[in-house]
Amino acid sequence: MNKKWNIAIVGATGAVGSQLVEILEERDFPVESIRFMASEASAGEILEYRGKPIVVETLSADSFSGTDIVFFAVSPRLCMEFCPSAAAVGALCIDVSGYWGMDDEVPVVVPEVNPQDLELFRQKRIVACPDSSTVPLVMALKPLQALCGIKRVVVSTYRAVSAVGTRGVDELRVQSGELLNGRPAEGKVFPRQIAFNCLSHSDVFMPNGYTLEEMNIARETRKILASPNLQITATSVTVPVFYGCSATVNVELADYIDPGRARELMAQSPGLTIFDDAGQGACPTMSDAVGQDSIFVGRIRADDSADSALNMWLVSDNLRKGAATNAVQIAELLLDKYL
């Protein structure tokens, strides 16, 4: 990648936007110029890129002239509104909000799993990142699918409060302080107290009783793995942790695989780190994953209630590989293969 590119980050002041800035620097992305955009409430703030101050601009439909790549780390509503404006002036849009992944003409990509789908970006000049819970799931499932096929997946995810941004982090911090000092905890972001508590849902409920995130995990997994008939069901729980994502996964395979063979397969897969010695108490935790781009896999074991099924435990950093790192990797691959 000898050429340098004009980059914009929409939502640069948020949790994922801040990670995008950091990861672009870490990975030495070929940046010619970079612009930060946000709502009027954040416009005028000063952020840094490689030690240089950059004033945050107010986001508008006319913001994208001269940009080559735009990362959208904002709400689905804003992404829906402004992505077409960026694409109309020739920018390549990478959506981290989840909105455009619902469009059949927009590829949803995890570079280690389905890089071939990136060529579909030409239809709308938009590529979508999946939900931060979907990323580790499909990365762990891909090597098993490639060997013998997957019949059914049952996944329960446990997501940190940063999944809703800095406001979620702030609410957990404030509520924890209030409760530790004997005062009641008031909530504005989450529907119930989150400090020292777990919420059995993590998003708005749909008519079928599932949340939107749970349905997205199932839909995105089918799309990324190119398995439209895959039987998959998800439950997503919000836990009082600042950063990270974890999941319990039960996968029923088309043929039996010994747990040892499954460990070998996943150990050879890019982006996965096996952290699995239950006899020594060595199982990954969410704190192990924070600040890391690898997906940690542990507790790989046979499901003794089924003939050809495995259980496993996944942990990852929801803001890095679950969002920002995946988005930057998409951009790198596009520049290398298609631009």
Image (cartoon, helix red, strand yellow):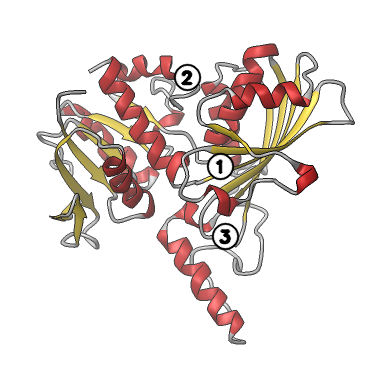
Q: Crowding at label 1, few (<14), some or many (≥20) Cα neighbours within 10 Å?
A: many
Amino acid at circle 3: Val
Q: Is residue 231 visible?
A: no
Indicate the position of residue 82 as horizontal and vertical percent values. Answer: 25, 39
Name the mark on residue 64: none
The image quadrant of residue 304 is top right
Q: Earlier in the sequence, mark 1 or mark 3?
A: 1
Q: CA distance from mark 3 to mark 2?
A: 30 Å
SS assignment at label 1: helix
Q: Residue at x 60, y 17 (%)?
A: 227
The image quadrant of residue 69 is top left
Q: Residue at x 65, y 39 (%)?
A: 275
Can you say which quadrant of the picture contains the C terminus? top left
Which residue carries the number 1 mark? Answer: 213
Q: Earlier in the sequence, mark 3 or mark 2?
A: 2
Q: Is residue 190 left or right of residue 255?
A: left
